[in-house]
Image (cartoon, grey):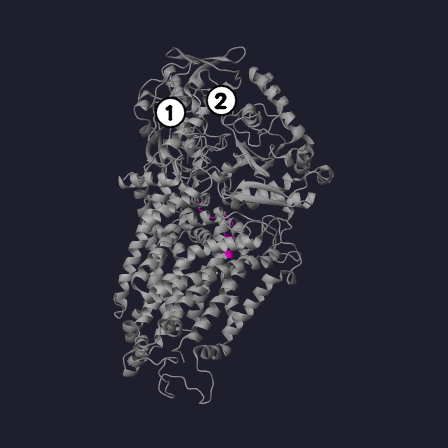
Amino acid sequence: MIGSTLLIFTMVWALPGDPFSGRCGQRPCPASFVAAETARLHLDKPLPVQYLYFLGNLLRGNLGLTSDGTSVAHELARAYPITLKLTTVAILMEIVLGIGIGIIAALRRGKFFDNLTLITSLVAISFPVFVIGFVLQYVLGVRFALFPVTVGYGAPWGDLILPGFVLALLSLAFVLRLTRASLLETLNADYVRTAIAKGLPRSLVIRRHVVRNSLIPVVTYIGADVGVLLGGAIVTEGIFNIQGVGGLLYQSIRLRENATVVSVTTVLVLIVLIVNLLVDLFYAVLDPRIRYE
Amino acid sequence: MKQRKLILTSALFAAGALALTACGGGSSSSSSSGSGSSGAKGGSVTIYNVKPQNPLIPTDTNEVGGSNVLDNLFTGLVRYDPTTAAPILSAAESITPSKKSEFWDIKLKPGQMFQDNTPVTASSFVDAWNWGAYAPNAQLNSSFFTPIKGYDDLNPADPDGDGPKTAPVPKVKTMSGLKVISPTEFTIEFKTPQSFFRVEAGYAAFFPLPTSFYKDPAAFGKKPIGNGPFQLVSGDGSTGFVLKAWAGYQGADKPSITQATFKTYTSDTAAYADIQAGNLDFMDEVPPGDLVNDQFKKDMPGRFISKPVGLIGTLTMPSYDKDYQDPILHKAISMAIDRATITKSVFNGSYIPATGWVSPVVDGYKAGACGVNCDYNPTMAKQLFAQAKFKGPFTISYNGDRTGNKEAYEAICHNIQNNLGASCTAKPYVDFATFRAAVTSYKMTGMFRTAWQMDYPSIQDYLEPLYVTNASSNDGKYSNKTFDSLITKADGQSGAAANATYQQAEATLATDMSIVPLWYENQSAVWSSRVTNVKTTPFSTIDLTDIKVK
Amino acid sequence: MSEPDSLSALDVIEGSPGTPTAPATGASRTLGGDAWRTLRSSWVFWGSLVLIAILVLMAIFPGLFTHVDPNYCEASRARLSPSSKAWFGDDIQGCDVYSRTIHGARASILVGTIATLMALVFGAGIGVYAGFYGGIVDALLSRLTDVFFAIPILLGSIIILTSIPTSSNTLLATMKVSLAIAVLGWTATARVARASVIQVKQADFVHAAQALGASRSWIIRKHIIPNAAAPVIVVTTISLGSYISAEATLSYLGIGLQPPAVSWGIAISDAAAYVRTTPHMLFFPALFLSLTVLAFIALGDAVREALDPKAM
């Protein structure tokens, strides 16, 4: 944990420019402002000293202020739940749609459905998220009014369906293909053939043996995705006007608010660590042969 | 062959999706029935805004997110006519300069109140300006008070520049140049003549503040109390602010609506989609993708404006770099740029080729200061270029985070390549902060983008802060003694005489063309079908006085 | 019941159920040989290879496909639709879209393949070792992975791309962008490889090989990797496509490849805002990107099936 915060702090500190370059637009910042901010943020001290100040404040629960005077903690408390909601919608879609469709595609291998999913995965991978988001927002939102165009105040769940889908789309393609490939392999395993040979109905075999055993790489990928989704939803958040962590991060990088960037990213690291831990524990549920030494 | 079928199907799929989108170019949103006549009184509108970067304190607000809100919460000594940009007396009853514009006498209208029912007095202004100028308060707009006598007492210099010692605390808290004569009168003494002050007086830095401000400035920055037509009811920067019309406002520009919400957006395309869907009522800029082919006019028939505002784009040569000190080279480059075609094809006519260094909306504007140097003349450009010593390779630097910049400066580079036969690269900096850091280090090795948005509508604002030797925003370190003396002379004159001298100064910029004028930016604004009687100001903001809900 | 494995130390019993029968004479019985035989007869394999060959040809010799300079642009031709003069039309600057699409193949495919190779070697390498050795090694490597995981893409790419000085040499710039993408993307490959290895590690034939005294590296090479390969192959082939697409997102955020470099990513991000009014500028580079992605996914699929030791 300490390691990551130090790494991130150094990275932000290494960004070119300083908190003043962008703040005053086309005029230079007044000397009094520069002096006051330098003193407040200890910008004239060497990097390790700045980091110690940051840690000290962090332990006291003081995360500092954003440029417009709001407390960083307040901003985090406002933005994280929204982004978490969006990520949850996206993950649910990945699980339900990705695994579901992947299973069906594997079972109907080579037929029309399988090829259709191949093409959809193709589109999802090759068209970058900002294109897909923009197109879907226009076609489904503005033109046919099937979904809200932007996300409303407080991010109600219904508003998050379309953005969640857009966010999940690329990962959906991965999950779909992974599930399909994993399932195809497991279908050929001896114990599966044995079970079928013994006379068990195919659907039962699939439900009880095949799916559980194919899911490990898929679950891993989904777990891996959480971190990516949380930190990388910036484009989707912009398109649908979601006031979440992505926008917060973008603003604070732009204004070189080091404290905000590090605070946001630290919470991110924490969440990712927890999720990965849960995923690891989940392996044992899926495959009882896995034990921990 | 299955693979061919796959390719075909995927191509059709993608084409279908794109075609659906393209076909949607026609008017999409169904508007609720509007009576068409002038709207009823009352109602609420939602306006596009971006997150303010600073607390909502007038002396700390220097960007559009904050000023959009503050300009409606306060009214200053003057306000600006939405059509002509001329200053109109608002809180002030009279603003009278002395003969040489060094002494100014301000009389206020009696009986004015703040929204917390405390009176607006001369001290409301003087105390606020003193607070803003006082160095330990670190206000971003403090430099606007620099010309006032006594400013330096409140801003003692740092004894060792960037070194470890800090500047000493100022010994006084008030500027000697500000004197309160009575509750409705005060005087200002400037260090040098400031003939344009009457126009400048409406800028946010000069707003008054109630006495409750000084008890807790931080809280005020979240919920300001002003003396203007609207008061802030709720909200924050991240989601938006809700403003209600203030019943106690006595000015002539009372609004007809009862509520205005400034909703914060992180991307302009989301806001544009919201206007189409009817969730947003007004947006003061159209995303470039919707400008082309007049798409926005098709999307919002009869609900758009495209008019000039106080924004100019220029290309600056680094005068401190020996390669870029030759006026012949500057003129060659300027004549090689086909401003008309670029503004038509890239900006769909929403930018207008510039003929001078001053925006057409301001008092004192005179067309054609640039003369033939800003005309597109590839033959002449080639001839001049042959005489120039430095032949490139050229770079044009810009900040890549503003939509429209990439297209503009790449187009200029193509002009230079095609017409002068020199290599040219448009070099983006990842964001505004990085870009400005590089520019203000005064080490640029190539040309770079500069733009100016006026603070107040005067020709002086486009010349003095930018091109006077060592001026605060003189990014290219340009120096022209004739220009400097003409500006000083104009500052001491007044009225038409001052404007004539400012125009003479502007004409001297054409002799060396170190700053190449490119274009004036038009504002393209759109609004929903819920509202009518929409007017915008020369500052590109919406005028909430006239807008009505249908 | 132990599962038969065609390359374990146990003899393959010809003709027993579940094993592929092979001629008694000395045809190759290694996994590689089996795989090659399967691939040889797969038209998906050959089809995707042909497509990739065409694209690679386009990348190396763009002059074979077009004579127009991709960087010659005239503002007066901006956004023109496809015509006989410009087969794919012109883009926002008035440059020929067909020419830019052909020339863009090089940078895009380079970025995709280099980033994928980096991610594969580094990511899969770490993942396999972490999964196989377990214990402290696993804990350490996993924590390392996690730290990289959580770095937001925006922050990470800005840092990497601004701290390495820009050079006008296009190859170096391409390497820089590939590095940024790989650094931020290798973690997915690592996690999937690790999980796959953990699963395979528990299989009976691995225990059997260990009981027979096989060395660890032998087991990794001969047993773990081929059996764990499938998910890694899937993730890698899709990753290649998504890395090329990621280059577009980096360009959209303003930190990707810069002109005068030409790539599909640059073309797509430049054209994105205008998709409603002039979609042809976006459509053609995106189409070529899709074809490339399709080719590699199909290739990956064919290879995965061929390598699957349990498939008939």
Please give the range of residues in magenta: B18-30
Quadrant in the picture for residue B311? top right
Question: How far separated are the C-alphas under marks 1 and 2?
Answer: 25 Å
The residue that mark 1 highlights is B136
Residue A228 x, y percent position in the rendering? 38, 54
Q: Secondary structure at mark 1?
A: helix
SS at circle 2: helix
**Would residue A151 be seen by someone viewing this image from the given angle?**
no
In percent of width and height, residue B119 lies at: 33, 17
Could you classify mark 1 by the number of other residues whose Cα lies within 10 Å: few (under 14), some (14-19), or many (20 or more)? some
What's the residue type where badge 1 is placed? Pro
The one nearer the camera, C97 or C13, is C13
Residue C128 percent across, percent down from the top left: 37, 66
Q: Is residue B345 above or below residue B364?
A: below
Residue denoted by label 2? B200
Q: Residues within 10 Å of mark 2 (few under 14, many from 20)?
A: many
**Residue A10 pos. (x, y %):** 40, 45
Residue type at mark 2?
Glu
